[in-house]
Amino acid sequence: MLILIGAIIGLVVGLTGAGGALVSIPLFMQFQGMSLKEASVFSLVAVIIASFSNLVFQRKDAQVPLAALFIIASAVGSFISEPFKHLISDIYLAVTLAAISIYSLYSVWVPIKASQEVNGTKVHPLKTVIIGLILGLLTTFTGLGGGVLMLPLLLKIYRFEQKKAVATSLVVIGFSSLASFLIQISKGTHLKIDLSFIGLFIGISITSYLLKLLMERLPKKTSSNLRKIVFTLVVGLSLAKIFS
């Protein structure tokens, strides 16, 4: 079963650069009998493996310096905004979530023209820091994963083509998840991984490789539509989880 779970997580993360925790937590709870706390920790492991496994095959499209700046700035934004989270009214949070979700879907389904792509090279570092701070704030206030918020930013503000946006998002969520995992372990969170979890790694790794082969063979329009559909499902899961 863990091979199948890993395959699903690897597919979602590899296609969208987002959604790993949203998919893995309910799967771990349903099929592995984990509590929410246990599933949350194991989901970080799954997202780390899925992010870096897919990044191995998509690394040529990743903009690593930009991703590193995002990681640092968003971490600072999350740290600064955490004490103020309880001050935000539920109705304002709901409106913010709806707006972000609509914009995310718009960004994915209405791509920029190839002639408009600048690959982030014309964006001033200060602007990236400011956007990263806002990203950290929104992640803290809304509970949406960083990848769900990253993709529309990379597509519309940085004008990346879709595959570059996904690859860069993989760097961000991979290292962000790793940092979160190490922090939890340092605070005494216990993680019990037995040999059966090798299946999780196998499932994710196989899917990551097969996904690379598939995306190379699919027509560009078909692969783009596949990414859009899966991302739409991820955003739908995000809203369903939060509003429930």
Image: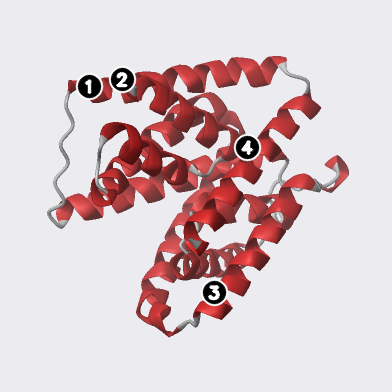
Task: Tell me how far mark 3 sits from mark 4, CA to CA.
Answer: 25 Å
Per the image, label 3 sits on a secondary structure element best described as helix
Q: Quadrant of residue 100?
A: bottom right
Task: Tell me how far mark 3 sits from mark 2, CA to CA.
Answer: 38 Å
Task: Tell me how far mark 3 sits from mark 1, CA to CA.
Answer: 40 Å
**Image mark for residue 93:** 3
Instruction: Left or right? Give the position of 164 relative to 22.
Output: right
Q: Label 4 belongs to which residue?
A: 230
Percent x, y for residue 33? 25, 37
Asked if disc 3 and disc 4 are in contact, CB closer than 8 Å, the reply is no
Residue shown at the point (12%, 54%) measured from the top left: 188
Q: Label 1 belongs to which residue?
A: 196
Could you classify mark 1 by the number of other residues whose Cα lies within 10 Å: few (under 14), some (14-19), or many (20 or more)? few
Asked if disc 2 and disc 1 are in contact, CB closer than 8 Å, the reply is yes
Asked if disc 2 and disc 4 are in contact, CB closer than 8 Å, the reply is no
Q: Relative to 186, does residue 163 appear above or below in the rendering?
A: above
